[in-house]
Amino acid sequence: MTLALVFPGQGSQRPGMGEPWVGDAGWSLVERASVVLDRDVERLLLDAGADELAGTAAAQVSTYLVSLLAWQALSPQTVSVVAGHSLGEITALVAGGVLAVEDGLAIVAARGAAMQSAVDEAQGTMAAVLGLEEDAVDDVCRGLPDVWTANYNAPSHVVISGRPAGVEAASAALRQAGARRVLPLPVGGAFHTPLMESARPGLESALDRMAYEQPSVPVLSGARVAPYGSDVAATLSEQLTAPVRWRQVLEHLRAYDVDTIVEVGPGGVLAGLVRRTLPGVRVLSVAAPDDVALLDR
């Protein structure tokens, strides 16, 4: 088995997603996170409602921690390559040996706070475009103001992002261009667009304080569709305003002869995108301790 791990980003969080991990050997991670962040992270993972978890800072911290709980439970699997969708790249950098767990947590907290500030400054939204090729979506966005292609998730599955008026205009134009569906997403920010530029100084301040090790396995960047090199901080900063090229990242996994891809963390969203992009590859999701046994079947 040649194994790749992929880690989810914001949007995969859900109420109670920490419950399966209570009492697990790795739960002490949550206790350490509460001390580092000076907040009740356990309550966030167990008792917070959907509205609270939808906030950028809460969504990112909670998703990062549950993904790490799942990753710790997988050890000692032999892994050939790791990747993460947006926020999930920070988790992937921990799994790839580049970042310490606590440093990753500090980056996630700083990233979430900086992005929330950018959201408060510039109202934005996103929409999923289904049934239209990427080039056609790009053409529509290039012809309109205040809207950009933000995520290339899977074949004929693209996300646009921008100011509400820009996304609304693009949505109408995309339907006219042949999109099967254009679905507004329940987010309050124009993520992965130039409207996130104001978040970069806050994130970079945290990134500059961190120590980065050489990766133990390749960690793929969604902005560059290439393994992380020595410029980890620059790559993570660039990611804030660059589109997530997730389909391209998944296709790049072929270079590692991967035959099994495991989504590690809550949600199951990435597993679906893998199936659409790489038919024939074995796909698993580990979101709870009982899921770990799936790897042995």
Image: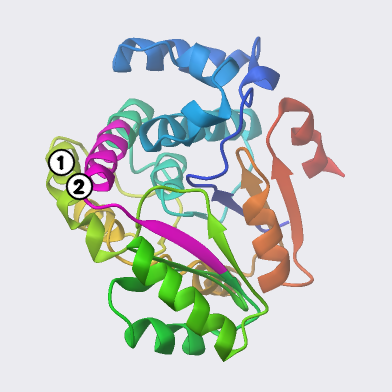
Helix, strand or loop: magenta stretch: helix
Left or right placement of residue 174 versus residue 215 in this view: right
Residue 119 in the magenta stretch? The answer is yes
Dot 2, crowdedness within 10 Å: few (<14), some or many (≥20)?
few
Highlighted magenta segment, given as a residue range: 109-128
In the rendering, which numbered label is found on residue 202? 1
Quadrant of residue 22 within the rendered picture: top right
Q: Name the residue under label 2.
A: 121
Left or right placement of residue 9 versus residue 183 in this view: left
Residue at 33% across, 38% down: 99
Disc nearest the viewer among 1 and 2: 2
Q: x, y percentage for residue 233? A: 21, 51
Q: Can residue 212 be seen in this view?
A: no
Residue at 36% across, 51% down: 189
Per the image, label 1 sits on a secondary structure element best described as helix
Does residue 263 sit above or below 141 in this rendering?
above
Q: Is residue 49 visible?
A: yes
Q: What residue type is labelled 2?
A: Glu
Q: What residue type is labelled 1?
A: Gly
Quadrant of residue 266 within the rendered picture: top right
